[in-house]
Image (tube, rainbow, N blue to C red):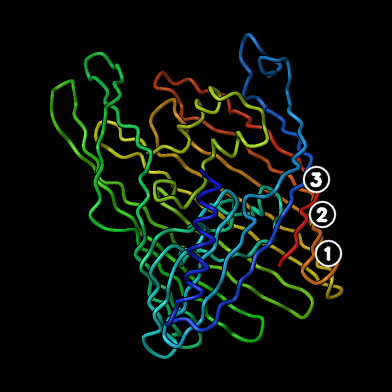
Amino acid sequence: MKKYTIIFLALALTAVFAVTAVANEWNLYGNARMATFYTSRDYGKIFQSEDNPSGDDQFGRSNFKSTQWALQGNSRIGATIKGDMIDARFEYGTGVNLRRLYGVWKFTEGWGLKIGQDYTPITFFLSGQAFDGDWGLLQVGNAYGSRKGQIALEGQAGPGMLKVAAITQTTPTVAASVVDPATGVVTALSSSGESYWPKFEASYQMNFADGMSGHVFGGFQNQKFYFNNPIDDTDTSDTINSYVLGIGGDLNFGPMFIKPQFSYYRNGAAAGWLGSVASALGNFSGLPAPVIGQLDDIDTVAIIDGSINNIDTMMAMAAIGFSPTEQLTLEAGIGWTYTDFDDSPGSFDKHTYFEYYLQAVYQMAPGVFLVPEVGYRDFGDLKFVRNADGTQDPDLDLGNLFYVGAKWQINF
């Protein structure tokens, strides 16, 4: 099936080249990227219990080592199209995965209406981190709205660029429950959600001078959930409001640069602005699926007795670099995420996560890059709310991940 899809895509592109009238300049591009990294994942105390005080998993191991040697999923091929009034772009990744597909109507000088799938306005790529598919500290310090379907207005406003977009909504993971006042038993509730509005994002990037810019951004999403209380057979509802606010910069001083950013979220995971903590813990780890499933609640917005337990998150990052020659750039980066769960007794309370890396970007020839990198992910300790009986569960050490290796890339 994939073979026929590729053939159809090639024929469609050939037809577009032959008959297009509104676009008069096509520029094809692409790149291939190989990840070659050694990783070592320490489990921390995820498996620790009274019967297993050492924290080993069911195979008697306290860590998991592996070597990644694979084509990166963000390898791509695409084209930009320039016309008198219409600009457009398409981009496909591995496995015929659509990354970007949009058109821009330039209705007046310096302004355009974008329709299609592209990076959302809150996305500013500041870190060059190569590990994990060019992770770039995304959602671990660097705000990221991903590539989403949108209708966006973009244009020059004073000394900078303004972007405003109405975006495809993200459906949050919700866990609704009710506590029986007579017995104290917690009962899970089924729920159904609805949305009246798209997700909204906006950003403004101001250019101060050559190589100097600052940016601010924000976003909002609203979704309503309905559920039935089987204890008194009543139908209730509640609304999850998500928003993000952030500020950052791209500051260059000759051969040196520093790129900082800070952002704050209320229920950010519910709107798709934060990565899954459970998935991050499972990547490169060898954690069994049931264990990852037990950690899924970290990413879940809880509704208990009709009241939302909001999740507040702060993120910060900084990438610092130096280019001694045109062919070599050295870069170091740090990302930080702090989450405060407004949850019930015995559940999650707070979590802190750090990520560090050091790399060298070496251009071996025009369009040919080797990026050796070493890094460390500290998954931090998961703290718990004091139990209803006054006892306190100990912090859960989620372990760490060390990696070293290189990314290889050829642009064409």
Mark 1 and 2 residues: CB-CB less than 8 Å, in contact?
yes
Closer-to-camera residue (24/44): 24
Mark 2 and 3 residues: CB-CB less than 8 Å, in contact?
no
**Which quadrant is the C terminus positioned in?**
bottom right
Circle 3: residue type: Val
Residue at disc 3, secondary structure: strand
Q: Which residue matches tag 3?
A: 404
Closer-to-camera residue (333/29): 29
Q: Between marks 2 and 3, how big is the CA–CA gap?
A: 8 Å
Q: Earlier in the sequence, mark 1 or mark 2?
A: 1
Relative placement, left or right, of 186 versus 408 is left
Q: Nearer the viewer, mark 3 or mark 1?
A: 1
Q: Which residue matches tag 1?
A: 362
Q: Characterize the local packing of mark 2: few (<14), some (14-19) or many (20 or more) Cα atoms within 10 angstroms.
A: some
Q: Could you tell me residue 187's position as x and y percent?
A: 29, 21
Circle 2: residue type: Pro
Q: Is residue 99 above or below residue 391?
A: below
Residue at disc 2, secondary structure: strand
Q: Could you tell me residue 86's position as x and y percent?
A: 43, 81
Q: Could you tell me residue 359's position as x and y percent?
A: 79, 57
> What residue sits 24% from the left and 37% below the top?
192
Q: Earlier in the sequence, mark 2 or mark 3?
A: 2
Q: Which residue matches tag 2?
A: 372
Q: What residue occupies the far bottom of the structure in this picture? A: 109
Q: Earlier in the sequence, mark 3 or mark 1?
A: 1
